Image (cartoon, grey):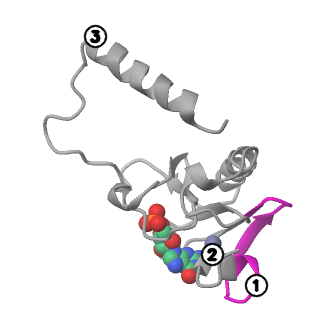
Amino acid sequence: MSGDCIFCTIVRREAPASIVREDADTLAFMDIQPMNPGHVLVIPKAHAAFLKDLPRGQAGPVFEAAREISFALRHSGLRCDAVSMYLADGKEAGQDVFHTHLHLIPRFAGDGFGLRPTPGFGRIADRAELEDQAARIRRGLAQSAR
Ligand code: 5GP
Ligand code: ZN
């Protein structure tokens, strides 16, 4: 755990948080600045600034918690017809709290929330480009501690 990390402080119960779920590896609690009512954060209890810093086996439990909570949100009475999950992995991706965390944001038609890329994003890439990128990522995977 990291002493000056707000999420580690919550794990230690030294800062207030509205907790919805806990298991040996993860904690889930309400986001203090919800994008929509019912916005939950799921974190690994172990401090890891980025997803890549999580020890092997510690990422799966985060998604398992998300699976249960996405069910619970739909049965909570909160307005939730769908759930957006978002993980900002790095400053340029929008990460503000450097203890990796998965956002679960309840969604409904017309809620106004969404990713809004500028025009030009989302074109169909050509196959050679995709093959080149896939090869680069495979090389990266070969180097990573799996
Ligand atoms: P990020 O921008 O890093 O993806 O998301 C950080 C999230 O943590 C934000 O949605 C923010 O509202 C939430 N957050 C920041 N500080 C606290 C806190 O002390 N308690 C809780 N519950 N959420 C926090
Ligand atoms: Zn932490």
Q: Which three-letter amino acid code belongs to the residue tagged 2?
A: Phe
Residue 125 seen anywhere in this rendered image of the structure: yes
Please provide percent x and percent y for residue 142.
56, 27
The residue at 55%/46% (across/down) is 81
Q: Nearer the viewer, residue 144 or 85?
A: 144
Where residue 39 appears, as percent x and y from the top left, is 55, 64
Tell me the kind of residue under disc 1. Answer: Arg
Measured Cα–Cα span from mark 3 to mark 2: 42 Å
Residue 37 or residue 87, whichever sits in front: 87
Q: Which residue is the site of mark 1?
A: 13
- Determine the secondary structure under disc 1: loop
- Residue 46 percent location from the top left of the image: 72, 64
Query: What whole-number distance in Å separates the C-alpha atoms at marks 1 and 3?
Result: 51 Å
Residue 121 counted in the magenta span = no
Image: magenta residue range: 10-27
Residue on which the image places disc 2: 7
In the picture provided, is 65 more to the left or to the right than 74? right
Residue sticking out furthest to the top:
127
Checking the image for residue 128, the label placed there is 3
Q: Is residue 54 left or right of residue 118?
A: right
For the residue carrying disc 1, how many other residues have a C-alpha within 10 Å: few (<14), some (14-19), or many (20+)?
few
Q: Is residue 15 magenta?
A: yes
Circle count? 3
